[in-house]
Image: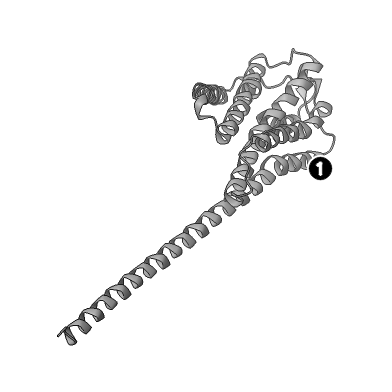
Amino acid sequence: MESVKNEVEILNNETSVSNGTKIDSFYFYEVEQFTVLWLLLIVIVAGNLGVIYTLTVNRSRKSRMNYFITHLAYADLSVGLISVLTDLIWRTTVSWYAGNVACKIIKFLQIVVTYASTYVLVALSIDRYDAIRHPMKFSGSWRRAKCLIITAWLISVLFAIPILILYEEKLIQGQNQCWLQFSEQWMWKLYMTLVSVSLFCIPAIIITSCYAIIIVTIWTKSANSFHNMKSKSNGERKGVFNLRFRQYEKGQLKRSYPKG
């Protein structure tokens, strides 16, 4: 997504420039952007490698949650290595030297891992919803978890397929670039709208709905449990009171009618 936004910005800035003018190299070598991207790459790689190592070492604690977190870590690590790292290399070289086939494949993989990072999180939310909302029907087997993960990756691949058609190597102002270009402005708007809906809106709605239902369910069960415990406690107190009252009555009767 970072590369798509960058290309949109470049295209907008160059619409009024003649074809003979070279691409502004300062954009590619901008210190602030390089610094942020390098820091982002280090944090992504180090953090997710740490998570993967920890979960791999502690295999004795194998659980569905760890299974989802592992796949989420792999997806995020792929974002760092495939998306951020290639973007850094491209900014360094300015021109695209890998060819048209590599252009399509790399851009395709960048979009796949970006979507996967989001939809694996969606799959985790659905699994937690099912565990809390339907605990009696919730199966402890791994089949459902694997199906959710496979579905997340398949959806990511499906959403990324158009990239294989849209991106291609083009000569832009004297430089070879892996480029996405539309002839009309409304096409850009439509493209960015579809990306926003599929990558942000839909996952956000699903995740928010799942966790909202989880919170309500836990809150309701806690309230009912507290009410049942209170009713039971009141019942026990009432029983103890009745027992002591009967013992008191028996004592009074014995005093009133002594044996004689």
Quarter of the picture containing the N terminus is top right
> How many numbered discs sit on the rendered protein?
1
Q: Residue at x 75, y 32 (%)?
A: 154
The local secondary structure at tag 1 comes to: helix
Q: Residue at x 68, y 38 (%)?
A: 144
Whether residue 1 is visible, yes or no, is no
Height in image: 32 above or below 227?
above
Residue 182 in the figure: left or right of residue 25: right
Instruction: Give x and y (percent) for residue 164.
Output: 81, 26
Up the image or down, 133 lies above or below 91; here it is below
Q: Nearer the viewer, residue 259 or 85?
A: 259
Residue neighbourhood size for the residue with mark 1, other residues' Cα within 10 Å, grouped as few (<14), some (14–19), many (≥20): few
Residue 109: x percent and y percent?
72, 24
The quarter holding residue 19 reads top right
Three-letter code for the amino acid on which mark 1 is drawn: Trp
The residue lying at 57 percent from left, 24 percent from top is 37
Residue 171, percent from left and from top: 81, 19
Residue pointed to by mark 1: 186
In the image: residue 251, left or right of residue 89 = left
Residue 237 is left or right of residue 31, and the answer is: left
